[in-house]
Amino acid sequence: MRIRKEITLINIRRLLAAAAIAVVSAGVAVSPAAAAAPQYKFTLLAKAKADQCFAGVGQPYPAGPPCRTGQSKVNQAYVWGLTQVGKMIWFGTGANVHCLVSGATLDYVKPTANDNWTCEYGESQHAKTDPAIPEYLGDMRAPEVWTYDTATGRSVNKSAEIRAKSPEDATRLAHTLGLRAAGNFGNVVLLGGPALENTLNMFAFDATTKQYLGSVNFPDYGNIRTFLVAEDALYLGVGIGRNGSAGGAVWRWNGSTTDPFAFQTVAALPVQAADLTVYDGRIAATSWPAEQPTTQQMLAGLWISPKLADGTPGLNPEDSAGWKQVWNARLYEPDRVISATYGGGGIAAFDGYVYWGTMHVPMKSSTVHATVYPPVDDQAAKDQAVKTQRAVSIWRGKDLGLPTQKIELLYGEKTLPAWDPATSTWSDKSTNYTPLYGKSGFGQLFNNYTWRMTVVDNKLFVGTMDWSYLVKDLLAGAAPPVNAKARKALADPDNWHKPLVSPANFGGDLYMFPSSTEPATAVNTRGLGNYLNYGIRNMIPNGKGGLYIGMANPMNLRTNKTDARPEGGWELLEMNKR
């Protein structure tokens, strides 16, 4: 893998100490996860290439690349779904995902462009030529399906085979926001993702011949998260409605190469199921919240299934009402509004426990809080902007659902700021937990997603998203229009407190728990070789004690290969011991 040069010139003065600064009490030192000796190496296997030319927001796209006018742009940003069949890795991508999140989740659609990325929203020529694409999704592009042969090192883009199958398949791919999940079972590879009109699209390939089998639209579902093989069956977490905000389910696949889209609902939940793992003969699932939760079951949480061995083997429709929530964000987060913005993240069974983490969309808690409690002046807006942000918390539990259940906070806070609407004041309130090992975000304040947990070589690896590189451009250039005072507080770096953003921490982080009796160590906190990789989106074991890793990198205008800086676009990496 080409060695990336360090940043040589960063003129960042008083950048926002943005997301999760509130989790650190004034004057309390941050205790980051211990740095591990460099025991692992990372090899770049494949990377997204520039696929468009950009001449300015709203302008027609020049021919290319190569681009005679304008500049090259790489739209494909995430390795969003990742699975392996024998020596073949299959993955699905997502394009300009940071723009889609800003538009769909934060309702921000003001076009912007800077040195790193652009979001055109409704000004995009792509949206203008397809009336089915709403303004807030104007930067969507058709996702891609790729294979990577681990024996030959050859990458193949399979997307053209989908478009060639039929006009319906081509339109279905064009109207998919991204291929968020990938799995395989019974000689079938499945890739799926959210689609226009708050629906769900899925595509299937024959795992042996690699031939495209077809696609389907599920109109009653709007999101998809994770496939899981458990005791000789394939399961899938899905959501209902826009971004899964109207409820969810767990499906069991009963298909074949001749009928690849046959599923049964084996969990009916008030929330969308996110990541899944097998623990103590059950499936444990993290969840994302409902759009307007009215009960604690509708918050981000942890759910467990009935025993897989009960009745007919595996989970079946009769088990759909037997799932139980065993933890939720309100049991930790003292502010009711903020607790409704938590998401459930990566999960894994490790050393007798279930480990899981939380997720926090940058600025979402601030914008929601400002909507519910509009700040009355500039100082109130500043306080609200700081005190509403959260970094990831890391948890584990055992004996889930039993009287002996034990839940432990590994990285998090004893107290968090909470707003009292009766007195219009902030105060630090107990979270009901004392962290066993350290502060939120593994001590890195901008770790906002626990994106994936994977066990390999008897160790637990945790990949995060770190949004510190985005802070200046994202907040100063695209502060969500919640309230004039709140918008000013979010957009002005001088409104934010210390510590300063450190270029040494740009890029997603990889941590490792050696055992259940030891804290995590930092394997890499610099994007695994490219600090523009703001997140570790996917990890699967490589069969050699290491990992195949799919990265998230939406810096769509960083495509100049002649300078000393790294480039944007997704990356597929392999991690092995040195």
Image (spheres, rainbow, N blue to C red):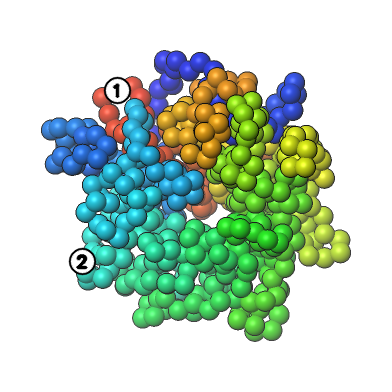
* 539 lies left or right of 453: left
Q: Nearer the viewer, residue 86 or 134?
A: 134
Mark 2: which secondary structure? helix
> Residue at (54%, 72%) from the top-left corner?
251
Pick the front one: 300 or 407: 300
Q: Are marks 2 and 1 in contact (CB under 8 Å)?
A: no
Which residue extends farthest right? Answer: 403
Which numbered dot is residue 164?
A: 2
Q: Image quarter for residue 233?
A: bottom right
| Residue at 63% over, 20% down | 498
Left or right: residue 473 compared with residue 160: right
Regarding residue 113, the answer to whether it shows in the image is: yes
Q: Is residue 14 above or below residue 250?
A: above
Circle 2: residue type: Ala
* Dot 1 alpha-carbon crowd within 10 angstroms: few under 14, some 14 to 19, many 20 or more: few
Residue at image location 19% in from the left, 41% down from the top: 61
Sequence-earlier tag: 2 or 1 = 2
Q: Residue at x 25, y 57 (%)?
A: 130
C-alpha separation, residue under disc 2 versus residue under disc 1: 38 Å
Quadrant of the rendering where the N terminus is positioned = top left
* Three-letter code for the amino acid on which mark 1 is drawn: Asp
Left or right of 251, for residue 307: right
Q: Is residue 304 above or below residue 496?
A: below
Decide if residue 465 is in sight here.
no
Coordinates of residue 115 in the picture (x, y in percent): 34, 27
Q: Which residue is mark 1?
A: 563
Of residues 249 and 476, the one nearer the viewer is 476
Q: Is residue 1 left or right of residue 244?
A: left
